[in-house]
Amino acid sequence: MKPDYSYCIKVCNDLLQSELSAVETYSQALEKYTEAPVVEELRRICLDHANAAAQLAVKVQDMGGAPENAPGAWENFTSFVRSAENLHGEESAIEWLQRGEEMARKHYQSALLDDDVITDSKMIIREELLPSVIHHIASLERLEEAV
């Protein structure tokens, strides 16, 4: 009998939607910047989120689920970043990206503490996805100071 992974699939799909939203948000932010170091770092982070989304999609499929393909939790950040240049300048876009990364960090930490998330999923979160988000936060802090 195959184990019931439905709850873990839901958690991983929620995380996947967050990663898809992050990709969309960073794509919007990249339209706001022209300086090479900032653009390069934002592209790298965007690619990290795309890779995380791919990993989560595979994890959902491995558990027998259908991966989500619509963005989710970063919607407010995407909207703000899209209009940040007009409202408050480039720095605000980076600040909002940091807030999105902090939200992602909390979601990953919550999944790690959830007894109903399977060990295999927790391993990828603990070893790859959460460290990546923590690195993004530090990178954005450095960018904010430089801009």
Image (cartoon, rainbow, N blue to C red):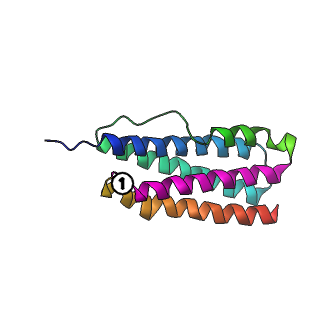
| Residue 127 picture quarter | bottom left
Q: The residue under label 1 is which amino acid type?
A: Ser
Please give the name of the residue rendered at 63% of the width and 38% of the height, measured from the top-left corner: 75
As helix, strand or loop, the secondary structure at mark 1 comes to helix
Based on the picture, tell me whether residue 99 belongs to the magenta stretch.
Answer: yes
Q: Which quadrant would the N terminus be assigned to in this image?
A: top left
Report x, y in % for residue 34: 80, 50
Give the tally of numbered discs: 1
Q: Is residue 68 left or right of residue 89?
A: left
- What secondary structure is the stretch in magenta mostly built from? helix
Please give the name of the residue rendered at 80% of the width and 43% of the height, measured from the top-left corner: 84
Mark 1 Cα within 10 Å, few/some/many (few <14, many 20+)? some
Q: Residue furthest left?
A: 1
Does residue 86 appear in this view?
A: yes
| Residue 76 picture quarter | top right
Please give the name of the residue rendered at 40% of the width and 37% of the height, measured from the top-left corner: 67
Q: Is residue 7 left or right of residue 45?
A: left
Please give the name of the residue rendered at 56% of the width and 52% of the height, measured from the top-left corner: 104
Based on the picture, tell me whether residue 42 belongs to the magenta stretch.
Answer: no
Q: Which residues are magenta?
A: 89-117
In the rendered image, the vertical position of residue 103 relative to residue 127, given as above or below: above
Report x, y in % for residue 68: 45, 35
Residue sitting nearer the eye, 9 or 82: 9
Report x, y in % for residue 64: 28, 38
Q: Is residue 144 left or right of residue 51?
A: right
Residue hosting label 1: 121
Report x, y in % for residue 69: 48, 34
Does residue 34 appear in this view?
A: no
Q: Which quadrant would the C terminus be assigned to in this image?
A: bottom right
